[in-house]
Every structure is written in structure tokens, then in C-alpha cells.
Amino acid sequence: MTTSTTTIYDLKQEKTSNSTVPLPTQASAVSWGAIVAGAAAIAALSLILLILGTGLGLSSVSPWAHNGVSAMTFGVSTILWLTFTQLFSSGIGGYLSGRLRTKWIAVHSDEVYFRDTAHGFLAWAVATLVTAAILTTVIGSIISGGVRAGATMAGGVATTAAAATVSVATTAGSGMVNTNSESSSMDYFIDSLFRKNASIDSKAEIPITGTLEVARIFINSIQTKNLPEEDIRYVGQVVAQHTDLTQQNAEKRVKDTFTRIQEKLQDAERISKEAADQARKASAYASLWLFISLLIGAFVASISATYGGRQRDM
């Protein structure tokens, strides 16, 4: 009797125990809290290091000749600093995303490794998107800086000659001195047309209307890139009247002066195109190296997350 009662009691206890002890539940494969924490660390560290790099970079350059680092050194140091920023910030953020994630029970080690890698990559991705959203203007200026610079310079070359010559005409009509370099160059060319022999004592001044008319003729010729023969003869007559030159020599001076103006404008256009091309190349190189540094950051964040995950499971 006693044996039967004890057996029934044990069965009841076992049934009660089996019904009250909960089975272990499987945690989610994605710990968004850990991912957001890692992303916040990556974004914050990247911002701090970028600000520090900007300060160090500005302190290393100088507008004075033979002072500061060269453009090549500055570019290489910028690339290295961006790469270091991605390495350090992504490494810390990826480690945190792996270390802070939920511990997975009864999961194969290969699956744990994959999930940790995914956590690090997602932390880097969220941080990159947040940084891009905050610094949209900066990234846009890097990508389109070369294009805008080229368009601005190309448009500026087309109007330099006309604007400078108009400034010459305005200066001559108002009697004011213009210190603009392009205007001063055109002043020099206009004055060279009416230059007299120093051995001739002549105090006759050239009328303003004459210089204005010559300036308008040059404006039209610069825009059309051609000086018509009738304009050459007329300007030659004006020059011959106010100098000791013959009509033939005056026309030759007009042609030579116009040729010099065209050469100067061609040089200015060449310099502007070279500057635009350098800006384009700089923008392309910056985009490529930014792409490479971001890929390095994604890789480091993924690897660091696996290390943090192993530390979490120990």
C-alpha cells in the first residue's frame, strides 16, 4: 500500500514539474538595439575624427609661398586620414554591435559567425546612411565640385574679354582708374595703339570718343574672333591721326595689337581649362578613395563584430 502511494505521488510530482518548467525560447536572429548602438558609435567617432582631421589639415597648409605642405602631401594625408577614420570608428562600432547582441542558444557556430558579421555590416550601413543624411551638402560638394568648377570657369572665360573691354570703355568715359587686372591689361592694349615716338614732342591728347570707339570695335571683334578689314582701315586711320605712323604702319599696329589680345585670351582660356581639369580629377579621385575607405569600414565593422560576439558568448 505504501509503495503504491509513493509511486502515485512521484508521478504527480513529475507531471507537475513537467508542466510548470518552461521550454527555452529561441531569441531573434537580429538584435536591433545592438546594431543601433554600434551605428551611433560609428557615426559619432567618424564625426569627431573628421573635425579633428579638418583642423589638422587647415593648420598644415599656408597661403604663403614655401610654407606649409604641398598639394600632393595634403591629398595623400587626407586619404590616409579618411581610411584611418573608417578603420577606427567601424572597428569600435562593429565590436559593440557584436558584444551587445543577444546570446543565441542552440545555434551552430557557423550561423553565429554569420549573424555577427551581419550585425557589424548593418551597424556600418546604418551609420553610413545617417552620416550621409546629415552631411548631404558636404558629400554633394565632393561629387559635383569638379563639374561646377569646370562649368564656372568655362563660362567665365567666354565673358572675360567682353567684360574687361566694357570696363575699359566705362573707365575711359568716367575718367576713373580701374584696378582690375583684366581691365588693366585691356587698358594697356588700347594705350599701345596710340603710343607715340618718345622723340616727338606732342602734347595733343587723344579724345575719349576715339578710345571708346576703338574699344567698341575690339569688343565686337573679340566676340566674333575676327577683325574685319574695314575696321582695320578705320582704326588705322584713327591711330595714324594721333600718332606719327603712316596708314600702313598704323594698320599693322592694329593687327598686331588684336593678335596679342587674342593670344592673351587663349592663354587665359587654357589656364582655365587646366584648372577645370584639375578640379575634375580631384573630384574623381576623392570619390574613388571615399568609396574605397567606406568598403574598408564595412569589412572592419563585420570582422570586429565577430570578435565582439565571441567575447559575448564566452
Image (cartoon, rainbow, N blue to C red):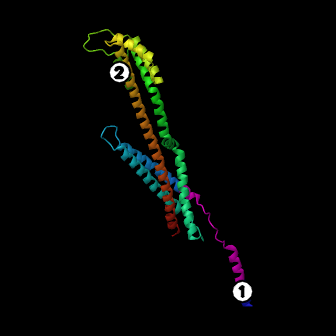
Identify the residue at horizontal 54%, vertical 54% (top origin): 125
Could you tell me which residue is drawn at 48 percent across and 59 percent down? 300
Q: Which amino acid does the dot numbered 2 rest on?
A: Tyr
Please report whichever mark, 2 or 1, sits nearer to the chain's N-terminal start: 1
The residue under the point 34% across, 37% down is 63
> What whole-number distance in Å separates the C-alpha atoms at marks 2 and 1?
121 Å
Q: Is residue 34 rendered magenta in the image? A: yes
Q: From this view, report whether residue 263 is shown above or below residue 40.
A: above
Q: In the rendered image of this protein, does residue 308 appear above or below residue 15?
A: above
Tag of residue 178: none
Q: Is residue 125 left or right of residue 170?
A: right
Three-letter amino acid code at disc 1? Answer: Thr
Residue 188's disc is 2
Residue 189, quarter of the rendered image: top left
Q: Is residue 177 visible?
A: no
The one of 163 and 134 positioned closer to us in this rendering: 163
x and y percentages locating residue 188 in the rendered image: 35, 21
Q: Are marks 2 and 1 in contact (CB under 8 Å)?
A: no
In the image, the segment drawn in magenta is 9-37
Give the dominant element type of the magenta stretch: helix, strand or loop.
helix
* Depth order, front residue of 59/223: 223
- Determine whether the residue tagged by mark 2 lies in a helix, strand or loop: helix
10 Å crowding of disc 1: few (<14), some (14-19), many (20+): few
- Residue 125 visible? The answer is yes
Disc 1 secondary structure class = helix
Q: Residue 233 location, x and y as percent? A: 41, 14
Q: Is residue 123 covered in magenta?
A: no
Q: Tell me the residue that label 1 is attached to.
A: 7
